[in-house]
Amino acid sequence: MTPAEFKATLRRLGRTQIGFASEIGVSRRTIHLWAERGPPAYAVYLLGLIERYGVRAAQEASTKPILGDAAAVLDD
């Protein structure tokens, strides 16, 4: 997978480089290097599994609002 294909795949899957790094437990620097040089085979395999099985991004998976009810906060 080329660097351009890697970045396009992340976009298609709704992931940012920082978010993907957090999801798979690698540093942001590692993902940045993959975006410059191309990812290793295990990352390509992982992206294929994510795509095949429709795994949502960690940011999307949570249905709990981060800030709670904005109207209630503003009323206080």
Image (cartoon, grey):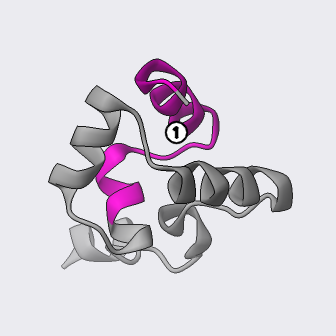
- Disc 1 residue type? Leu
Quadrant location of residue 56?
Answer: bottom right
Residue 24 pos. (x, y %):
43, 70
Q: Is residue 36 above or below residue 57?
A: above
Task: Quarter of the image for the C terminus: give it.
Answer: bottom left
Task: Quarter of the image for the N terminus: give it.
Answer: top right
Residue placed farthest to the front in the image? 41
Residue drawn at 55 percent across, 51 percent down: 41
From the viewer's perspective, is 35 left or right of 65? left
Residue 3 pos. (x, y %):
41, 25
Main SS, magenta residues: helix
Q: Which of 47 and 13 is in front in this view?
A: 47
Q: Is residue 63 above or below residue 39?
A: below
Quadrant location of residue 38?
Answer: top left
Q: What stretch is highlighted in magenta?
A: 2-21
Q: Nearer the viewer, residue 66 or 22?
A: 22
Residue drawn at 38 percent across, 78 percent down: 68
From the viewer's perspective, is 46 left or right of 27? right
Question: What residue is shown with label 1?
Answer: 10
Q: Which of 28 and 44 is in front in this view?
A: 44
Quadrant location of residue 73?
Answer: bottom left
Residue 4 pos. (x, y %):
46, 19
Residue placed farthest to the top in the image? 4
Residue drawn at 52 percent across, 39 percent down: 10
